[in-house]
Image (spheres, rainbow, N blue to C red):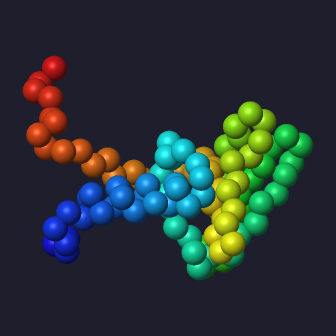
């Protein structure tokens, strides 16, 4: 069972704080990979995020561009790269917003 009074609201607030830290929009999901080795590579006009899982398996994701520039945000301690990767997504809704059968 989840701990805390409002874990969903705590998550929403934390994701807002991360977007504020990097000074970016919140139109993507966050995937913290803080302990993994990573790099960015460019092939022609395409940019790729490459990172290695704990079993040394390499994963590549296409970096999203906005106005022709790759979405790569950096602070002193962290980098956030907005890329397209195949992931499972947990959609979270309020039960009071469920529509009746359509």
Residue depicted at 86% across the width and 48% down the height: 43
Closer to the camera, 5 or 65? 5
Coordinates of residue 44 in the picture (x, y in percent) = 89, 43
Coordinates of residue 99 in the picture (x, y in percent) = 15, 29
Residue depicted at 82% across the width and 57% down the height: 41
Residue 67 occupies which quadrant of the picture? Answer: top right
Identify the residue at the far right of this view. Answer: 44
Coordinates of residue 18 in the picture (x, y in percent) = 50, 60
Closer to the camera, 30 or 42? 30
In this picture, residue 60 sits left or right of residue 92: right
In this picture, residue 66 sits left or right of residue 84: right
Residue depicted at 53% across the width and 50% down the height: 86
Residue 14 versus residue 92 in the image, above or below: below
Q: Quadrant of the C terminus?
A: top left
User: In this view of the protein, can residue 87 be seen by the observer?
Assistant: no
Residue 60 versus residue 95 in the image, above or below: below
Coordinates of residue 76 in the picture (x, y in percent) = 69, 72
Residue depicted at 78% across the width and 36% down the height: 68
Tell me how many marks there are.
Answer: 0
Residue 57 occupies which quadrant of the picture? Answer: bottom right
Residue 37 occupies which quadrant of the picture? Answer: bottom right
Q: Quadrant of the N terminus?
A: bottom left
In this picture, residue 83 sits left or right of residue 68: left
User: In this view of the protein, can residue 16 be seen by the observer?
Assistant: yes
Residue 31 versus residue 2 in the image, above or below: above
Residue 9 versus residue 68 in the image, above or below: below
């Amino acid at each position: 069972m989840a701990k805390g009074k409002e874990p969903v609201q705590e998550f929403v607030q934390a994701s807002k704080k991360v977007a504020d830290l990097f000074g970016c929009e919140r139109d993507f999901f966050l995937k913290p990979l803080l302990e993994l080795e990573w790099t960015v590579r460019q092939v022609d006009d395409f940019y790729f995020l490459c990172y290695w899982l704990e079993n040394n398996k390499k994963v590549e994701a296409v970096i999203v561009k906005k106005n022709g520039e790759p979405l790569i945000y950096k602070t002193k301690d962290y980098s956030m790269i907005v890329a397209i990767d195949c992931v499972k997504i947990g959609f979270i809704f309020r039960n009071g917003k469920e529509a009746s059968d359509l």
